[in-house]
């Protein structure tokens, strides 16, 4: 979860995730308080539970999702042909790696590291 995001901006599913899987007791208490303040009916709670289970399933699938062909080419070829402008701090492959790490694409991150190394060896 994004630490800079205010608790009232979290979705119901995100709040439920904090409540069920959180480690910070203060954040869990805030999430419980915010969740209860939303006056959610029993029917809505069951819908949120279903959405939460889908959220967790997608999160698990994300860990094992491989690189697509376009992503593979991005890490293998494009970083060598796209110059890095002076005013731009991030490179396309670096920002993609940050995205993989932030959103839990563990397999993609590992594959991207390998592909980048293969690309360097290939171009040398």
Image (cartoon, rainbow, N blue to C red):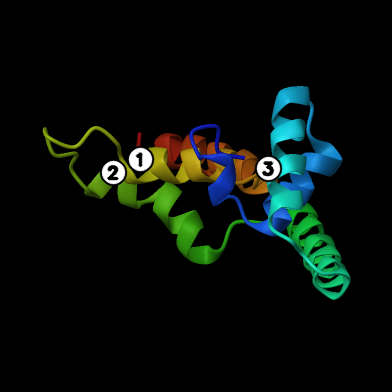
Image quarter where the C terminus lies is: top left
Between 45 and 97, the one nearer to me in the picture: 45
Residue 112 figure quarter: top right
Q: Where is residue 82 in the image (x, y as percent from the top left)?
A: 22, 48
* Proximity of marks 2 and 3: CB atoms separated by less than 8 Å: no
Query: Badge 2 is on which residue?
Result: 80
**Residue 123 circle label:** 1
Relative placement, left or right, of 21 versus 77 is right
Residue 52 picture location, percent across and down: 79, 60
Report the disc number at residue 96: none
Left or right, residue 81 beside residue 76: left
**Residue 66 is drawn in which quadrant?**
bottom right
> What secondary structure is found at the residue carrying circle 2?
helix
Which residue sits at x=69%, y=51%?
A: 14
Q: Disc 1, disc 2: CB below 8 Å?
A: yes
Residue 75, given in percent of the width and then of the height, sits at 44, 47
* Viewer-proximal residue among 7 and 109: 7
* Residue 64 appears in the figure: no
Q: Badge 3 local density, few (<14 within 10 Å), some, or many (20+)?
A: some
Note whether 107 is above or below 65 in the view shown: above
Q: Crowding at label 2, few (<14), some or many (≥20) Cα neighbours within 10 Å?
A: few
| Circle nearer the N terminus (1, 3) | 3
Residue 46 left/right relative to 81: right
Q: Can residue 103 be seen in this view?
A: yes
Q: Distance between the residues labelled 1 and 3?
A: 26 Å
Q: Is label 3 in a helix, a strand or a loop?
A: helix
The residue that mark 3 highlights is 106
């Amino acid at each position: 979860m994004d630490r800079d995001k205010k608790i009232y901006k979290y979705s119901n599913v995100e709040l439920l995730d904090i409540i069920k899987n959180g480690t910070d007791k203060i954040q869990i208490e805030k999430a419980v308080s915010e969740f209860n303040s939303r006056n959610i009916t029993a029917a809505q709670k069951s819908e949120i539970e279903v959405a939460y289970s889908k959220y967790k399933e997608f999160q698990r699938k994300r860990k094992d999702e491989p690189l697509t062909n376009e992503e593979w080419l991005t890490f293998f070829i494009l970083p060598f042909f796209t110059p890095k402008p002076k005013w731009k701090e991030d490179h396309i492959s670096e920002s993609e790696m940050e995205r993989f790490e932030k959103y839990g694409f563990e397999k993609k991150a590992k594959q991207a590291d390998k592909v980048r190394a293969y690309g360097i060896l290939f171009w040398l």
